[in-house]
């Protein structure tokens, strides 16, 4: 197994993780930004006020995108494990 191939596999793994996590992270970021703007407008700076909307939004995103996320990660893992014999011979 060459060094370039190992770097390629690691890169593909990182891209897969970022692709799978992106919807949840983006929704969490958007909800946090909206809550921060509302706090700035109303001048209510309660730290615990940001957690509940973010948690609800992230759980909703996991429910909506969860099956897709599992499918992306499973496809990557299946591809790695299906070619494991080839990788061992390199």
Image (cartoon, rainbow, N blue to C red):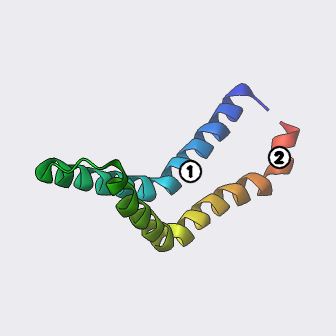
> Label 1: how many residues lie within 10 Å, few (<14), some (14-19) or many (20+)?
some
Of the pair 19 and 54, the residue shown nearer to us: 54
User: Which residue in the protein does label 2 denote?
Assistant: 86
What residue is rendered at 70% in x and 56% in y?
77
Determine the secondary structure under disc 2.
helix
Q: Is residue 89 left or right of residue 53?
A: right
Gap in Å between the C-alphas at discs 1 and 2? Answer: 21 Å
What residue is rendered at 42% in x and 59% in y?
23
Q: Nearer the viewer, mark 1 or mark 2?
A: 1
User: Which residue in the protein does label 1 denote?
Assistant: 16
Which circle's residue, 1 or 2, is located before the other in the chain?
1
Q: Is residue 40 above or below residue 1?
A: below
Determine the secondary structure under disc 1.
helix
Q: Is residue 35 left or right of residue 3?
A: left
In the rendered image, residue 89, in percent from the top left (x then y), is placed at: 87, 40
Q: Quadrant location of the C terminus?
A: top right
Q: Is residue 59 above or below residue 12?
A: below
Of the pair 37 and 60, the residue shown nearer to us: 37
Residue 56 falls in which quadrant of the image? bottom left
In the rendered image, residue 65, in percent from the top left (x then y), is placed at: 48, 68
In the rendered image, residue 83, in percent from the top left (x then y), is placed at: 78, 52
Of the pair 9 and 32, the residue shown nearer to us: 32
What residue is rendered at 36% in x and 58% in y?
27
């Amino acid at each position: 197994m060459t060094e370039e191939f190992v770097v390629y596999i690691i890169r593909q793994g990182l891209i897969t993780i970022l692709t799978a996590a992106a919807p949840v992270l983006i929704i969490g970021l958007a909800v946090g930004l909206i809550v921060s703007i509302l706090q700035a407008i109303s001048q209510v700076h309660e730290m615990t006020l940001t957690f509940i909307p973010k948690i609800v939004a992230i759980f909703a995103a996991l429910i909506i995108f969860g099956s897709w996320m599992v499918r992306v990660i499973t496809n990557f893992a299946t591809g790695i494990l299906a070619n494991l014999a080839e990788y061992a011979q390199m």
